[in-house]
């Protein structure tokens, strides 16, 4: 997923202690404090550790866990509700009498264990975790069946009216399960450390089509009943469903795209190089493990750039620029097929292991397909995002959240979706590559993805594995990299790699020249890549007059661009400088686009100024029906007290 805060209590030079507290789940009696040890003198020693405790689930997998889900769902657009039956294969240890699942805002109608009705217990609501579902079992229990309904307010589900879609004729539904929203549409053990296979049967209105993060149909049927199978074990956050008036168009033998009929041709053109990306990824880090790699273009209310649901990436239409310039997002989600989906962070405190690796892998794929200069510009954008995030966090008093290793105790894991996990994680891996050499690092990564395939890992175990299998073999590399500083300390380390790009230099030079008085019309901007426009806009003064804004917009047509990365960056300046001539474009963008990456900085600028707070509130009231819970909850936090 494109772009979780940390308060580490103790860091010692020769001993790293990481304690996960279970106050929010006191029944986790079998998994006490997890202590990981890495010493300077014997850093290759294997750690004597227990599996980390996931503080964001009620499940106790060491006692009882799910291994397979058979899901039957009916999709009711009129009542905005899913109703269904979830049947789990389970494994229960000796002397265990309960299995615990996660739910939130679900109506549990009936529970059966091995075909016999069971008296379940549903705990009081926890504001972050939802409700614990306790089901009586024995060590001989094999199946748990839960009959349930979702709430119309289920946070994972986005129900769209026909007017909110491209075709304007049919309703649409999509899910967003990451980080802990799967529990709002399926009662499950909602932890990245618990994997299960699944099958599903989904009934939808006959004119619509259903697709999931599984083996998918490629055309509509006459019954409205669709069946699915996911043979590889996945965590609950990768459960995904979408229902709408969909068409499929193949790209290559293993790739294709789903979209609404009016969007299918444009989408297929934009993603024509998916096969090249898949080939490049396999060339770098081994065989793709998921069969097909398809992508679905969702309505613009989707809150992220993309979501790496296995076999079916969910993508925002904001990357349809018409010139394939924003397809690095596809490379990012494809990279997740290895980093995240194949090798998964054990808990959300280790989120950087998913995202930092993925940004690094994305960069390598883009270099393979588009060349080194293109990849260097992407790396520089990552640096700018990281620098801006660190500065903003320090200004907001949340500098502790600039560490890679998170502490999300009593917090929602979504709090950690920042540039830190993505971009600081990327630059740590880039530093390792630069220090040991790309060839050695690639051998290490191939080994890492192979050994940990369909497993989880955590920060401390990764550090030990890194030292044993790479750094200890390259003299002086541990001292040069100092990975503990990157992971456990705040801010940006001084040894961050320096990236050079001639195109970046030209964009900065143009911005400097304009600031010094050169008219915009005289700047040399012919054949600029979109990244150069982002560099240019970032290098402009924060405060601009209306005349300056007008000159720039007239010359470069920022307000009319079809590239949403450029438009989003420009509208931040429009909001900051109260450039009223572009307010119509700002309003249209905020009402129609639900991608949080764009919404947060624009609303942030509007809310920061007393004069534009009323405008922010007015636009939000109009736009809220178009936003997924992930985006609306973020904007409402920003508006609190305003």
Image: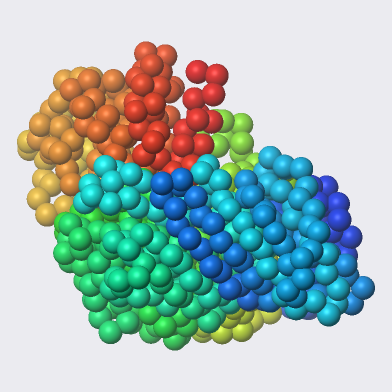
Colour mode? Answer: rainbow
Q: Position of residue 385 (x, y in %)?
A: 42, 46
Q: Residue at x 32, y 50 (%)?
A: 171
Q: Position of residue 485 (x, y in %)?
A: 65, 55
Seen from the viewer's position, the closer of residues 371 and 238 is 238
Seen from the viewer's position, the closer of residues 364 and 274 is 274
**Along the horizontal axis of the image, is 610 left or right of 520?**
right
Q: Residue at x 40, y 53 (%)?
A: 173
**Along the horizontal axis of the image, is 571 left or right of 381?**
left
Q: Position of residue 164 (x, y in %)?
A: 29, 43
Q: Residue furthest right?
A: 95
Q: Residue furthest top?
A: 611
Q: Residue at x 45, y 80 (%)?
A: 290
Q: Residue furthest left?
A: 521
Seen from the viewer's position, the closer of residues 284 and 41 is 284
Name the image quarter holding residue 223: bottom left
**Along the horizontal axis of the image, is 256 left or right of 123?**
left
Q: Residue at x 18, y 35 (%)?
A: 559
Q: Is residue 601 above or below residue 357?
A: above
Q: Is residue 26 above or below residue 164?
A: below
Q: Is residue 485 visible?
A: no
Q: Position of residue 75 (x, y in %)?
A: 45, 57
């Amino acid at each position: 997923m494109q772009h979780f805060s940390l308060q580490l209590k103790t860091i010692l030079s020769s001993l790293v202690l990481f304690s996960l507290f279970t106050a929010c789940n006191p029944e986790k009696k079998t998994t006490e404090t997890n202590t990981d040890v890495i010493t300077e003198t014997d850093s290759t020693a294997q750690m004597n550790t227990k599996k980390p405790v996931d503080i964001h689930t009620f499940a106790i997998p060491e006692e009882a866990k799910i291994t397979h889900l058979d899901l039957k769902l009916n999709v009711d657009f009129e009542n905005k509700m899913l109703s269904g039956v979830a049947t789990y294969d389970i494994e229960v240890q000796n002397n265990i009498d309960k299995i615990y699942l996660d739910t939130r805002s679900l109506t549990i109608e009936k529970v059966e264990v091995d075909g016999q009705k069971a008296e379940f217990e549903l705990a009081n609501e926890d504001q972050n975790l939802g409700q614990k579902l306790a089901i009586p079992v024995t060590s001989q229990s094999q199946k748990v069946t839960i009959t349930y309904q979702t709430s119309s307010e289920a946070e994972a589900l986005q129900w769209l009216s026909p007017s909110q879609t491209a075709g304007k004729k049919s309703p649409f539904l999509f899910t967003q399960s990451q980080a802990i929203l799967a529990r709002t549409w399926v009662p499950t053990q909602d932890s990245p450390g618990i994997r299960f296979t699944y099958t599903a049967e989904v009934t939808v209105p006959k004119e619509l089509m259903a697709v999931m993060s599984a083996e998918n149909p490629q055309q509509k049927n006459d019954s409205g009943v669709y069946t699915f199978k996911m043979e590889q074990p996945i965590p609950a956050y990768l459960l995904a469903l979408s229902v709408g008036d969909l068409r499929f168009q193949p790209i290559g033998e293993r790739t294709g795209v789903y979209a609404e009929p009016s969007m299918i041709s444009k989408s297929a053109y934009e993603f024509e190089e998916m096969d090249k990306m898949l080939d490049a990824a396999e060339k770098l880090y081994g065989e793709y493990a998921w069969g097909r790699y398809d992508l679905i273009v969702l309505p613009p209310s989707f809150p992220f750039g993309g979501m790496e649901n296995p076999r079916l990436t969910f993508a925002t239409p904001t990357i349809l620029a018409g010139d394939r310039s924003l397809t690095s997002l596809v490379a990012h989600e494809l990279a997740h097929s290895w980093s995240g989906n194949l090798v998964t962070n054990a808990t959300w405190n280790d989120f950087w292991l998913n995202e930092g690796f993925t940004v690094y892998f994305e960069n390598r794929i883009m270099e393979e397909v588009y060349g080194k200069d293109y990849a260097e510009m992407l790396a520089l954008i990552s640096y700018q995002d990281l620098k801006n995030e660190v500065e903003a966090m320090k200004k907001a008093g949340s500098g502790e959240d600039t560490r890679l290793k998170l502490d999300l105790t009593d917090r929602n894991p979504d709090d950690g979706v920042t540039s830190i996990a993505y971009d600081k994680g990327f630059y740590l891996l880039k530093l390792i590559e630069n220090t040991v050499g790309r060839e050695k690092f690639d051998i290490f990564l191939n080994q890492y993805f192979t050994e940990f395939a369909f497993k989880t890992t955590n920060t401390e175990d990764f550090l030990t594995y890194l030292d044993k299998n790479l750094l200890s073999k390259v003299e002086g590399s541990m001292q040069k990299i100092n990975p503990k500083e990157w992971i456990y300390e705040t801010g940006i380390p001084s040894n961050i790699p320096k990236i050079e790009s001639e195109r970046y230099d030209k964009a900065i030079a143009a911005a400097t020249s304009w600031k010094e008085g050169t008219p915009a019309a005289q700047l040399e901007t012919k054949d600029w890549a979109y990244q150069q426009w982002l560099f240019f806009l970032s290098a402009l003064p924060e405060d601009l007059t209306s005349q300056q804004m007008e000159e720039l917009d007239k010359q470069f047509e920022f307000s009319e661009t079809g590239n949403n990365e450029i438009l989003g960056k420009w509208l931040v300046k429009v909001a900051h400088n109260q450039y009223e001539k572009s307010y119509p474009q700002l309003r249209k963008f905020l009402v129609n686009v639900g991608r949080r990456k764009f919404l947060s900085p624009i609303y942030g600028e509007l809310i920061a100024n007393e004069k534009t707070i009323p405008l922010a509130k007015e636009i939000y009231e109009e736009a809220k029906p178009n936003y997924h819970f992930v985006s609306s909850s973020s904007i409402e936090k920003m508006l609190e007290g305003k």
